[in-house]
Amino acid sequence: MHKPFEIRTAADNLMLLEKVDQLARQSFTPFFFEGDQAVVRYWKEMMIRCRSFQFALFQEQELVGAGVTVPLYWDGTLTGLPETAESIYLPSAKEPNVLCALAALIPPEHQGKGISPYVLNAMKSLARQHGFSSLIVPVYPHHKSNYPLVPMERYMHWRRGDGLPFDPWIRVHWRLGGKILKIMPKASVVRGTIERWERWSGLRFLDSGLYIVPETINPVQIDLEKNEGIYIEPNVWMEHFA
């Protein structure tokens, strides 16, 4: 069994906020923070503005997990769910009524220890504390990168022989009561020069076309004439009632 976790928010702790931000930058692929213009423009400001909703899990004095979340207004309809990252990072025009999870983070030395469900439950607890109706999550399906040519519309509904979701991260959410809502079509849009994409991927691009790039869940469109590669990443909206 796990020792009890202590949840500490970054509300009045800028050092903790910096640790959560650093862990996020270490956990995501370089192209996310360097090539997604919504992240480049709004991530840091969002973290500071919503610092009461950034937290870490501690066992005694050791950081074993963290979460990045942001309060949003959602009208409860499928069409009302954000389709782009800007809709999440920018302040809500209306009073927030749900909490949106952006990242559940586990330091490398603590991965594989079953901590991620505790991070998700901490997010649900944070939503309840602020009187929000639910936790909504644009889930990044971890194993989709093994099947980049399979449409997300099909992949997100794949099931194992026991009836549980095939994707392990969707499965974690499912076991904690999360339900699939719809696809978020443009959770991340990454643009970069050919040189950048070659650095990010470790590949060479000698012709224009679609390429399967490591750690992507859709092909990357390479255009040598425009000196540009574009990657559009869909996620899967799921909801947990707080």
Image (cartoon, helix red, strand yellow):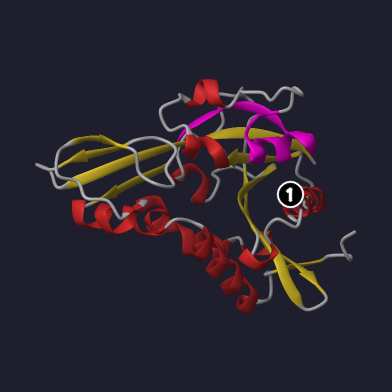
Disc 1: which residue: 120
From the top left corner, tell me how far across and down residue 168 is, in percent.
66, 39
Residue in the image at 50% along x and 51% along y: 89
Q: Nearer the viewer, residue 45 or 54?
A: 54
Residue 70, how many percent across, how many down?
61, 52
- Vertical side of 230 occupied by 123: above or below: below
Q: Which residues are magenta?
A: 165-187
Residue drawn at point x = 83 percent, y = 76 percent: 60
The residue under the point 51% across, 65% down is: 26
Q: Is residue 186 magenta?
A: yes
Q: Is residue 78 shown left or right of residue 7? A: left
Asked which secondary structure carries label 1, the reply is helix
Residue 140 appearing in the image: no
Tell me if 51 is positioned left or right of 223 in this view. Answer: right
Asked if residue 78 can be seen in this view, the reply is yes
Residue 14 vs 221, above or below: the answer is: below
